[in-house]
Image (spheres, helix red, strand yellow):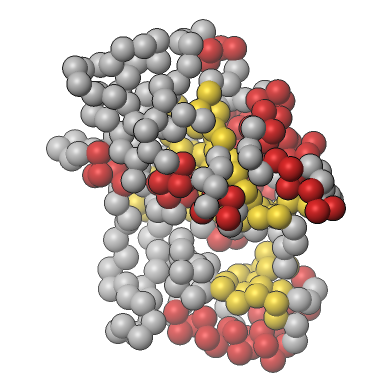
Amino acid sequence: MVQPASHPRDPRGGARGRGHRRRALPQHVRLGQPEARHRGEGLPKGEGNPQQTRDRLFLRPSRPLGGGPGGGPEEGLRDPPHPGAGRPGHGGPLVLASGEKEMAEGRLILGKEALDLLRASGLSVLRTEEALDEAQAVEAARAVGYPVALKLSQAVHKTELGGVRVGLRYAEEVRGAFRQLRRLQPTGPLLLQEMGQGLEAFVGVLTDPSFGPVLAFGLGGIFVEVLEDLSFRLIPIGREDAREMIEELRAYPALSGARGRRVDLEALEGLLLGVSDLVKARPQLLEMDLNPVFLSEDGYRICDARIIQAP
């Protein structure tokens, strides 16, 4: 895991404290708009690998980097507790992040609420409906159109928990999947969603204590897990920054027509700009994980989102 130094390097060079080198951000990070550039020549280079940075950005809820009073760098990176939580076969149903979504560092926004927030900001999301029982799930599936996906609404790590069922084509499959997921999430709505198609990508935001909000972009699967292929910019960004974030990925050929699958790059630029504009307009949004985002020649669709908002 990439760890932030307790004495971060000043962007103009040198370190605030002897013997410390800033490690909060990888070398991919660059300054965005001119108003950010004049503060220094560039962000310091990080020493961890991008996969570790992605883990910290996207795979665990966390406070802004730097920890809290009396704690080291790890203090701000711990998962929020879910009292009584367990895994299937280890003590019964999961007790997930439901009801009280207030975390020590802010409010955790998940599920349809997070997607609705993004939709209201002009971003494109997959159609998602909530269902409290089997009948509502079947009705929602008919409204959305088969095939559909059914998933937990109150978990951050849905896939790891076995909380996602995809490719449901009939009412009986929806009913069966609903019963299975109800064992993991006994209360609250489950999410019924249209199936996404295209290349999987993620877009994220992390608030750095020294440089402010950072925008991250990469493709999913092997591109991150094996190639460790990510790009970063400080928010706000402009159209040129968005284009550079896309083109500097080693996976760029997969976006620009390799194997006959071309992505709408203009729409993708619009997604990155839209997230930047949203965070600029609402600085209380400390972290954001849009993952996965489906990219195709017809544009993009956000499938799932996790947002942390300051209290």
Residue 231 percent across, percent down from the top left: 57, 35
156 vs 117: above or below: below
Q: Quadrant of the C terminus?
A: top left
Q: Is residue 269 above or below residue 155?
A: above
Residue drawn at x 46%, y 41% as measured from the top left: 50
Which image quadrant for residue 10?
A: top left
Q: Nearer the viewer, residue 2 or 306?
A: 2
Question: Percent from the top left, x then y, of residue 263?
Answer: 79, 46
Please indicate whether residue 1 sits to the left or right of residue 240 in the image.
Answer: left
Q: Nearer the viewer, residue 129 or 180?
A: 180
Residue at the image position 36 percent from the left and 11 percent from the top? 13
Query: Which residue sits at x=63%, y=40%?
Result: 250
Which image quadrant for residue 57?
A: top left
Observer able to see residue 213? no
Is 101 left or right of 181, judged from the image as shown? left
Using the rendered image of the protein, determine whether residue 244 is visible from the camera's viewpoint: yes
Specify the farthest residue to the left: 70
> Can you say whether 232 is above or below 90 in the image?
above
Q: Position of residue 147 (x, y in %)?
A: 76, 76
